[in-house]
Image (cartoon, rainbow, N blue to C red):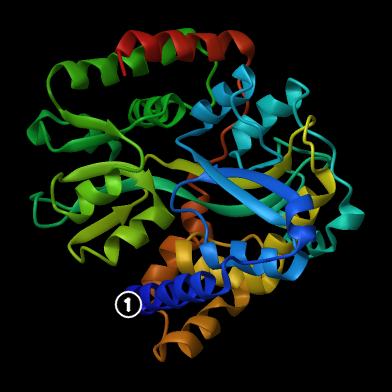
Amino acid sequence: MKKILALAMMMVTILTLTACGGSSSGSESKDRVVNVCSWGEYIDEDLIYQFEDETGIKVNYQTAESNEALYSLLKTGAGDYDVIVPSDYMIGRLIAEGMLAELNYDNIPNYALIDARYKGLSYDPDNKYTVPYTWGTLGIIYNTTMVDEEITSWDAMFDEKYAGQVLMIRNSRDALAAALLDLGYDINTTDEAQIREAYELLADAKSKGVYQSFVMDEIFGKMEGGNAAIAMYYAGDYLTMLENNEDLAYVVPEEGSNWFVDAMCVLKNAQHKEEAEAWINFIAGTDANLANMDYIWYASPNAEALEQYPAYYEETYGEELDQETFGIMAAPADVLDRCTLYENLPAETLTLYNDLWTELGI
């Protein structure tokens, strides 16, 4: 029902925009623009049109495949962005390298709505550069009709029993984290021997044909279509896949995992800083967070929105929100207690990650 209503609303939006010739008009929309880069499947596009209508600011919205791909775009100058939405550890790296602008929070009053637990975190301890966008967990998605057991451990991502049926995530930080966790190590370790041992676990599984492929957004079609049995991905995206395949299940493994915060930042060389802060303030608002949470299934850092969402869901769809679903979207304390936030790693450790990933041949 949720999917049907979402598609219906999208069609109405498309028809309206077609009839009107666009989401905004006049010279103001031509003069004011904001260039945004985020991830795929990660925004209710109606919010873009609403922002344009309310402000007259044109939004150029683009996506990157991963934090590492975004970093490469920024370093090579290929991405002409104002606002980006990286994850915690990458934010720490961008701050350390002087690539982000300090925000004028006077222009972002909705920052006051962000829950204190998502402020002052290790990547931005003084709250100078970021406004949290979403948070969630990393875990294992599996098709209950294609495996013969309930999956509870990261072992499943390296098990020859499922050769050819496993999808490994296509970014080095998450993939190596799965191996580190399976070996009982800290996901933020800087111990070269531990990282190399994790790499060998990953490389050995790859050489034995455990992995059907290394994926990012391709995972949606593969898991929804029953073309793979096991995958490593994010809780919010799992809930999107579940709408199209009820045989899927999600677990944060017993060894623990990563919990993450993605946040909105402005690049130091942004050409449209005022427009960027207007966009961030709009997205951080309660109404926008409710709509976005409903569309992308990622938990909101806006305290009002997260508290109101079950009632919002019931009012929108005429049925109660399943509490198990809500617990996957917004992981409870007992799950988060087993999870760790990624930290920005030292330069020599990042170089090791890059070298090992290249050696893996992805």
Camera-nearest residue between 22 and 271: 22
Locate residue 71, reporting x and y percent: 58, 25
Front in this rendered view, residue 41 or 112? 41
Q: Quadrant of residue 177?
A: top left
Q: Which residue is mark 1?
A: 4
Q: Is residue 306 visible?
A: no
Question: Quick one: 306 or 48, which is closer to the camera?
Answer: 48
Front position in the image: 76 or 308: 76
Residue 317 relative to residue 27: left or right: left
Residue lying at the far right of the rendered structure: 106
Q: Quadrant of residue 210?
A: top left
Q: Is 5 on the left or on the right of 347, as rendered?
A: left
Above or below for 229 versus 95 = below
Q: Residue at x 22, y 30 (%)?
A: 213
Mark 1 Cα within 10 Å, few/some/many (few <14, many 20+)?
few
Q: Is residue 78 left or right of residue 284?
A: left
Per the image, label 1 sits on a secondary structure element best described as helix
Q: Quadrant of the N terminus?
A: bottom left
Q: Position of residue 335 (x, y in %)?
A: 46, 54
**28 up-or-down from 35: above or below:** below
Looking at the rendered structure, the kind of residue marked 1 is Ile
